[in-house]
Amino acid sequence: MKIAVIGVKSMPAIQGGIERHAEELYTRLAARGHEVTVFCRRYATDNRGEYKGVRIKRLSSINTKHLDTVTNVFLASTIALFSDYDIVHYHAIGPALLSFIPRVRKGIGICTTIHGLDWQRKKWGRLSSSFLKLGQMCAVLFSDSLITVSDDLKKYFSDKYPRREVRYIPNGTNKPIKRIGAQALSSWGIERKQYLLFAGRLVPEKGCHLLLAAYRDIDTNVRLVIAGADSHSKGYADGLRAAAREDSRVVFTGFVAGHPLEELFSNALGFVLPSDLEGLPIALLEALGYGLPAVCSDIPPHLEVGQLGQFGQNGIVFFRSGNVDDLRRKLDELLADSKNLRRQANEARARVFEMYDWDEITSTTEDVYFSIIGRSHKVKPIEDKQPEPQDGWPSSNQQENYECPDKSSL
């Protein structure tokens, strides 16, 4: 099967949930023998040709807040129209605005994954929000299959468009590599189990301004690490740094990926995600995969992850979204009861991997593609499956300072 992927900035992922989703999904589909082409932004990726079996096409864009996506997606959609792809898969409602272009060619299958209601994001003005709502409508009208990454998003589309079939296929997470070494921590002047971690883009809907306001009045030596870069929201990110200028406990790392990010997750005391808008946050799934207790806003996608079926306690503490005082109280609760919450979080790890497994997600997406083109198939075994865990953590030939969890300290 020949698959074109549109709406992704980079491959491999630099930052952003969509890019992480695309990397995990399409490298697995390529390993199953499918011919996958991902259209990326020229400025965002250095890959020329291929990444883990995925073909990379770097296209230009007008790299401004309002024109970056639409110009890149227009070029990609036009190329897809005159190519022989079986499936063109759009990611997010902004790119879906142009999904009518390849629809012109008979026999091509259109798929759209909704990662969030982007028109609700605070960085967009009234006109931009209107175009994003139009993109949402195009996704509904022109897609052979409409996918959402959370049950809450599925409910929204099912209620608003009752005649439209909607599939739920979540984001996923991998069994993590635990890195106890402190090389990256030392560069930022932080110590193991002596910091709370936020990891994500520095945009208003992630709620970092609420986190700083709540943390400011907490009497603690536990530091706050904010790992991430701005995304067409430099003014907001600069405002965060200005607000924290007088508090030496706050550390801004900038963009972090790879081993340094794994080190941050491995050694944190807890994780904080105060967002007021999400699809299904991969960062939260990763934190739970590391066995970190978490403080999260009580928005539906977070509550969905917090349920994890019917298994009970999971180390997540919820606060009322947008309420600084309640966030402050819940941060105090995590700091006061971190060992008990960590025990709960470690007990929940297996359930996280079971419910949000990238291999299962790949199989479900593959089934959707074949249902669109009406072809029976036999699934090939995945070639790059994650190694089985040992004592709760996977092994790694690259991991020199591997350490199993100290259960006596939980």
Image: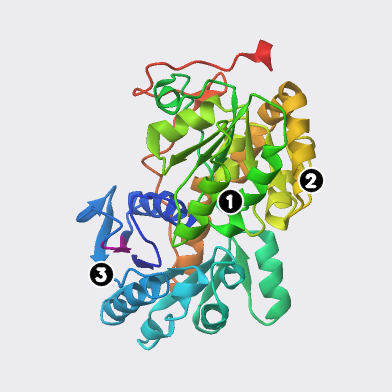
N-terminal-most mark, 1 or 3: 3
Q: Amino acid at mark 2?
A: Asp
Badge 2 vs badge 1, beta-carbon distance below 8 Å:
no
Q: Within 10 angstroms of label 2, few (less than 14), some, or many (20 or more) residues?
A: some
Q: Amino acid at mark 1?
A: Pro
* Disc 2 versus disc 3: nearer the observer: 2
> Which residue is pictured at 72% across the width and 57% down the height?
300
Q: As drawn, which residue projects farthest toward the top?
A: 408
Q: Which residue is denoted by mark 1 in the rendering?
A: 281
* Disc 2 versus disc 1: nearer the observer: 2
> Which residue is pictured at 41% across the width and 40% down the height?
256
- Horizontally, residue 127 falls left or right of residue 108, namely right
Of residues 239 and 322, the one nearer the viewer is: 239
Residue 234 inside the magenta-drawn segment: no
Percent position of residue 13, x then y: 38, 50
How far apart marks 2 and 1 lie (CA) works out to 24 Å
How far apart marks 2 and 3 lie (CA) works out to 45 Å
Q: Is residue 202 visible?
A: no
Q: Which residues are magenta?
A: 36-42
Q: Which residue is denoted by mark 3 in the rendering?
A: 60
Q: Which residue is denoted by mark 2 in the rendering?
A: 325
